[in-house]
Image (cartoon, grey):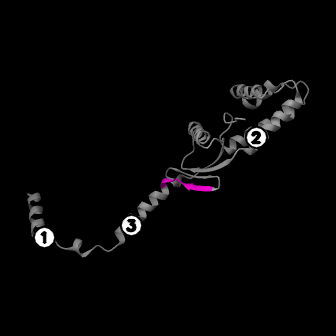
Amino acid sequence: MDLSNFFRTKTQSDDFKNRVAKISEMAYQTNFNLEQALIEEFGLERKDRFLTLVRDNKIDTASASHIKAFMDKIQTEIAAIPLVPLTIAFEPKEQTLKALCDWFELNVKKQVIFDISVDKKMIGGANITFNGKFLDLSIKSKFDQIVTSVLAKQAAPQPAAQQQKPTENQSASHLHLGR
């Protein structure tokens, strides 16, 4: 079941699960109306997407037990989606999250939920953990390596050849520039 149209982050998926649980609890109430409950919990656009999901799964919307079972199935599906910790240097926009999710679906063939952490000290790039592997793709680690390398070169004693006085030819060409 593809739920990527409803959430991309852990916070969003937790909110979605809570809303689904509310609808599930209401299913046995007298005069329960699924469409109205979906509008109240999700708004018009997401209600339409949710109803498409209901139709695609051939759920009898007149049956409280079918609605409840479907909502439970959604909860189970969400719990099975891999959680991917992702640390980035900025607060991602929805377009960025969609691109990241699309990349995973295309390359890993899985929907994932991102557990986003923002660390402005990273400068750029990302740290990601997936399938038990940690990747440091941040600019900060590369930047720190460059700074360390430059500082090490500056701290190293300069060879004697660079400390000599200019030769006669060097002095003469220097004088021509000064005229």
Mark seen at residue 101: none
Distance between the alpha carbons at the discs numbered 2 and 1: 78 Å
Distance between the alpha carbons at the discs numbered 2 and 3: 52 Å
Front residue of this view, candidates 18 and 161? 161
Quarter of the image holding residue 51? top right
Whether residue 27 is visible to the viewer of this picture, yes or no, is: no
Look at mark 3 in the image and give the residue it sits on: 151
Report the quarter where the N terminus lies: top right
- At horizontal 68% and vertical 38% (from top left) the residue drawn is 7
> Disc 3 on helix, strand or loop?
helix
Front residue of this view, candidates 31 and 146? 146
Please tell me how crowded label 1 is: few (under 14), some (14-19), or many (20+) other residues with Cα within 10 Å: few
**x, y (%) of residue 48?**
71, 25
**x, y (%) of residue 68?**
85, 33
> Disc 2 on helix, strand or loop?
helix
**x, y (%) of residue 13?**
71, 41
Q: Which kind of residue does numbered mark 3 sit on?
A: Leu
Question: If you read the primary sequence from the N terminus, does the residue marked by circle 1 or circle 3 appear first?
Answer: 3
- At horizontal 74% and vertical 38% (from top left) the residue drawn is 16
Q: Are marks 2 and 1 in contact (CB under 8 Å)?
A: no
Mark seen at residue 167: 1
> Disc 1 on helix, strand or loop?
loop
Mark 2 or mark 3: which is in front? 2
| Magenta residues, start to end | 133-139
- At horizontal 42% and vertical 65% (from top left) the residue drawn is 148
In the rendered view, tell whether residue 163 sits above or below residue 18. below
Is residue 135 rendered magenta in the image?
A: yes
Q: Which kind of residue does numbered mark 2 sit on?
A: Glu
Mark seen at residue 77: 2
